[in-house]
Image (cartoon, rainbow, N blue to C red):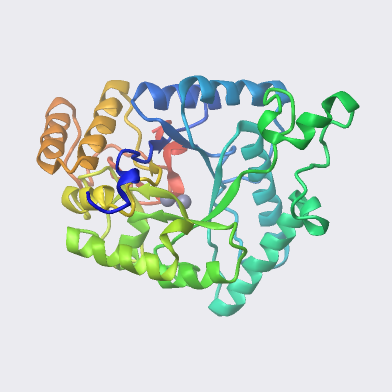
Amino acid sequence: MEHDGDRHLGRLGRLGRHVPIAGGVADALERARAAGYDAVQVFPGNPKGWRHVPMEPEAAAAIRAEARRLDVRPVVIHAPYIINLAAEDELAANSARGLANALERAQDIGAAYVVVHAGSSKGASEEVGIARVARLLEGVRDTIFPSSLSSPSSPSSPSSPSSPSDTSTAESPVGADMATAPMAMTTRILLENGAGAGSTLAGSPEALGRLLAALPGTVGACIDTAHLWGAGCDLSSAAAVDAVVERLDRAVGLDRIGVIHLNDSAVPLGSHRDVHARLGEGTIGLPGLAAWLAHPALRHHPIILETPLEDDPAREAARCAMTRQLREGDVDGAAQALAALRESGDVPGPFDATAKTVSGSSGRNVRGTVEHRALPEGNVRG
Ligand SMILES: [Zn+2]
Ligand SMILES: [Zn+2]
């Protein structure tokens, strides 16, 4: 409480969650807000497909207006899982287009970040994989920011209004009419750490650091606690969390982290698997998650939960409130809230393999857990 980090203490990062967009993005924003979240993450469309439907400017403006009205920010887009930034040939070309589409959607709806998995070099060396990611991102940048090639400081975009009366707003994105003017490209790409399976890149803090070191400083990091856990980073106690945060700071730099994905895990530490569980219902547990949330170096980062969404809005609101309790360091209170949720619902304890399924065909079909690949879009149907 004494040092000059104090100014951050009153400014907790926002708490959001991944929400399905089956009913539209505006509905997703509303749903998150109603549950008590003030940030949100969505897929740009089908997380498992390449299809991209351009958004009508009026629809995009309505979503941006709704996010402002509800004070939900940041809005985060999670790029489709089929993107592999470290791929070759056709998959690389599709991945570049997929990422560009996600960035376009982010600009449409005013999303500050596009989170994308670091990719897999599919048997090639890490060095080769990193070089492929760097080349692919450079290609995407040249597609999306053509002006950045010749004049990096120019705020103009190819579709900026050019009539004389619009000159001032075209030159000044801040003063532009958000409802009609194209926004300056303010969306930041964040590469997400993985659980270290096979030849996936960024499977440890150090590997993520090596990848980011080869990329422009504008590319940041998204850190997922369940992925850290799968990669063998112990997060189950305050001391363990301290050590991991120190590793992240050394390898990646905490300033480079844009968003944190806060998930419990349904699989063991170091399993190199990625199965999300609701907070307190997995292998990391409440004390470790509370230590992460309360860590002074992480308190002001926006948090996104990627845990299975409750069908009942009241129960989801209780999950949100419990997470805020956890953030205050009130582990006992959070544990009581969790026990009450268990008693009042038919929610089984963790790892009850006989329970109703929530995810699709992939992953462990255990209620309360969800394979990362089958995040809430599947859950909403399940
Ligand atoms: Zn992810
Ligand atoms: Zn994640």
Image height of 97 relative to 315, above or below: below
Place of residue 48 in the rendered image (x, y in percent of width and height, measured from the top left): 56, 46
Residue 190 visible from this viewpoint: yes
**Nearest to the observer: residue 132 or residue 22:** 132
- Indicate the quadrant where residue 195 lies: bottom left
**Nearer to the camera, 99 or 325:** 325
The residue lying furthest to the right in this view is: 163
Q: Which of 245 and 310 is in front in this view?
A: 245
Residue 181, horizontal then vertical, whole percent? 74, 28
Task: Determine the image quadrant of residue 57.
Answer: top right
Q: What residue appears at the point 80 percent right and 58 percent down from the top-left corner? A: 149
Q: Is residue 204 visible?
A: no
Taking the spot 38% from the left edge, 33% from the top edge, the residue there is 382
In the displayed structure image, the side of residue 362 where residue 106 appears, left or right? right
Q: In the figure, is residue 297 to the left or right of 238?
A: right
**Does residue 248 lie above or below 103 as drawn?**
below
Image point (27%, 41%), residue name: 368
